[in-house]
Image (tube, helix red, strand yellow):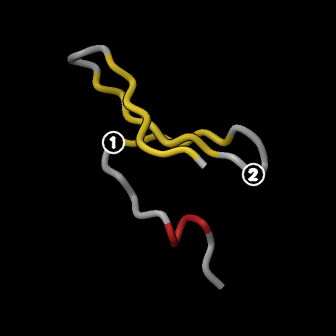
Amino acid sequence: METENDIIPRIAGAYSRRINIQHRLIYQILSEDKIVKIVRTR
């Protein structure tokens, strides 16, 4: 059985935060530019 981690490819330098049981936020921090880049939400 596939899990969510198997379906979503790993993105270099990306962080994942679970908002709740159903939703997740994946983002990258671009420290040189002081920017938080939202990669994916679900």
Q: Which secondary structure lies at badge 2?
A: loop
Q: In this view, does 8 lie to the left or right of 10?
A: right
Residue ID at (41%, 63%): 9
How far, Cα to Cα, is label 2 from label 1? 23 Å
Characterize the local packing of mark 2: few (<14), some (14-19) or many (20 or more) Cα atoms within 10 angstroms: few
Characterize the local packing of mark 1: few (<14), some (14-19) or many (20 or more) Cα atoms within 10 angstroms: few
Name of the residue lying farthest toward the left: 32
Marking on residue 42 = none
- The residue tagged 2 is 22
Residue ID at (52%, 72%): 6
Image quadrant assignment for residue 36: top left
Image quadrant assignment for residue 18: top right
Q: Nearer the viewer, residue 39 or 34?
A: 39
Point out the image quarter for the N terminus: bottom right
Residue ID at (41%, 42%): 39
- The residue tagged 1 is 13
Residue ID at (49%, 42%): 26
Looking at the picture, which amino acid does disc 2 mark?
A: Gln
28 above or below 34?
below
| Contact (Cβ within 8 Å) of mark 2 with mark 1 | no
